[in-house]
Amino acid sequence: MLTQTVQTTPIAGQKPGTSGLRKKTAVFQEPNFLENYVQSTFDGIGGVTGKTLVLGGDGRFFNDTAIQIILRMAAANGAAKCIVGQGGLLSTPAASHLIRLKQADGGLILSASHNPGGPDADFGLKYNGPNGGPAPEAVTDAIFERTKAIKHYKICAADDVDLATIGHQTLGEMAVEIVDPVSDYAALMQTIVDFDKIGALFAGGFTMCFDAMHAVTGPYAHAILEDMLGAPKGTVINGTPSPDFGKGHPDPNPTWAKMLMNKMYAPDAPDFGAASDGDGDRNMIVGRGAYVTPSDSLALLTAHAHLAPGYRDGLAGVARSMPTSRAVDRVAESLGIGCFETPTGWKFFGNLLDAGKVTLCGEESAGTGSDHVREKDGLWAVLLWLNILAETQKSVSALMADLWAAHGRCYYARFDYEAVDSEKANAVIDGLRSKLPMLAGAMIGEQQVQMADEFSYVDPVDRSRSDGQGIRIVFEGGARAVFRLSGTGTQGATIRLYLEQLETRHDRLSEDPQKVLANVHDAVLGLSDLAAITGRTAPDVIT
Ligand code: VG1
Ligand code: CO
């Protein structure tokens, strides 16, 4: 096998964001771009000589080509072994599990998650460490530094690896094992939730629709929901992964999962609906005529997790990202367990999970997970919901009504202003930052500010510090607003505005969220000058 050292020039400014590096596909396809970033990753983690890596992606356009390049580079860099999902497929949680199960040294996940795929859309690459979780900031910083200095990369000349056939092969000196992407993950799920109970639920006529959105969870959902749990064929829709996600936007929210929403709000709606994103780490939960916000879903799972075998002994604690609503805080308090508030992005949960401080964690962006892997896990959340539905024999809307009656309801919405000129987006945040010192105690519209700051996080385990994690404004009376810039977009900047309003009055628990949030919305939008600075009068997406 011929190993080549190819001279190259640094790639400017390729900083991994909230979840790895995300770019337009065409950028990843530029000569040497992927190679430079992969070599920077290998260098940034101290080389891959003798290491075992897990490799797989969500099946989007360029997935297969990129995997062959990465395999040839891993071999040239002296890796001992690569474990690859058959067909190049691995959901993000399944990759996290494989890293842990096989005690690999890390893994590379090819995905731009919920971003669309295709030649004109997005691609991404993420490195996960030996604990199965997204690289912490110290590692992504090291990778970023290498992208600025890289002068050559190593690759070998070899035929393509046969990704279709399960079993063992070699690429030069490197071993390659092609594994079934689903079986180990499915076996893990059987240790966490009660498959017999859920099977009995389906046998009793319970109906469900799972929208895989033409993305990676299709094969997982067909195998687990239909084949193992006995849900009727057709329960899973859009279940074949496609390189451009059927020209869709594989983001499980009411805007993009329209097909599922229409089914769930129709007169003959199934009992339960769910969807997952491009790489299978997100989930959307919807009952018959009842959409559940991700923040509420985290609170509900926290309240009832002990009903599933994997959590029978209770939870050590929970964690949520800062913009996620404080619904879970209220449940955690009633359970007498700790509740941690972290910056956005799953990498911040890793240390808490590793240290055994938390068992469940989640984000407002449809991410929920537990200590079974080190990523958020879409299908796991769906299965835990099913376990709870089977145990309680209640509907989704009845479970939510009970939760709100017990803890109050945190009305919640997120407004996204996408593809904003980066300078203008920064100006909005800078403007808010400059107003922070004057805000405490001030009246904004009809609302009095209790506390306003820019969120900083000190990791309770390794004391690492992350600044600039979003502007938060907390009001007297249970309202809160958060402004932050997205770290996953590929075009300009995305401003996210997160709004929350707690309601504990029992006769006000079924209001229209937008109406309840109108007050805090108008107050903070005025304060931010967002419309004046960006020229945007309405968000692109509300979730
Ligand atoms: C978004 C979400 C964040 C999530 C991240 C990765 O990040 O807000 O909660 O962890 O996507 O999710 P940002 O920086 O754009 O707000 V995934 O499913 O794309 O890996
Ligand atoms: Co995702």
Image (cartoon, helix red, strand yellow):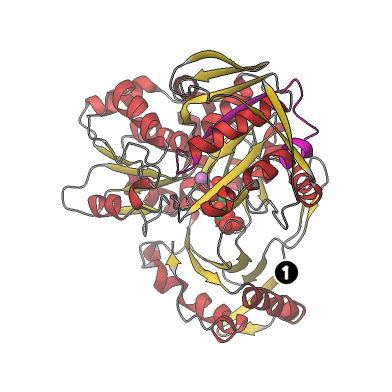
**According to the image, label 1 marks what residue?**
453
Q: Looking at the image, can residue 329 be seen? A: no
- Residue situated in front as seen by the camera: 259 or 214: 214
Q: Nearer the viewer, residue 373 or 4?
A: 4
Do we see residue 320 in this rendering? yes
Q: Does the magenta portion include 52?
A: yes
Nearer to us in this view, 38 or 278: 38
Q: Residue at x 60, y 27 (%)?
A: 54
Q: Residue extending furthest left?
A: 268
Residue at (23%, 36%) from the top-left corner?
Answer: 207
Ligand 1 closer than 8 Å to label 1 CB: no
Residue farthest to the top?
168
The residue nearer to you, when weighing 142 against 93, is 142
Which x, y percent locates residue 485? 62, 65
Give the number of callouts. 1
Image quadrant assignment for residue 110: top right
Range of the magenta residues? 40-62
Horizontally, residue 305 falls left or right of residue 275, namely right
* Quarter-of-image position of residue 314: top right
* Residue for point 41% across, 49% down: 250
In the displayed structure, would residue 159 be above or below residue 293? above
Relative vertical location of residue 65 with respect to residue 367 in this rendering, above or below: above
Q: Is 197 left or right of 462, judged from the image as shown?
A: left
Question: Quarter holding the C terminus?
Answer: bottom left
Q: Quadrant for residue 69, please give it.
A: top right
Type of amino acid under label 1? Asp
Image-based side of 64 in relation to 23, left or right: left
Q: Is residue 307 positioned above or below 292 on the image?
A: above
- Helix, strand or loop at label 1? It is strand
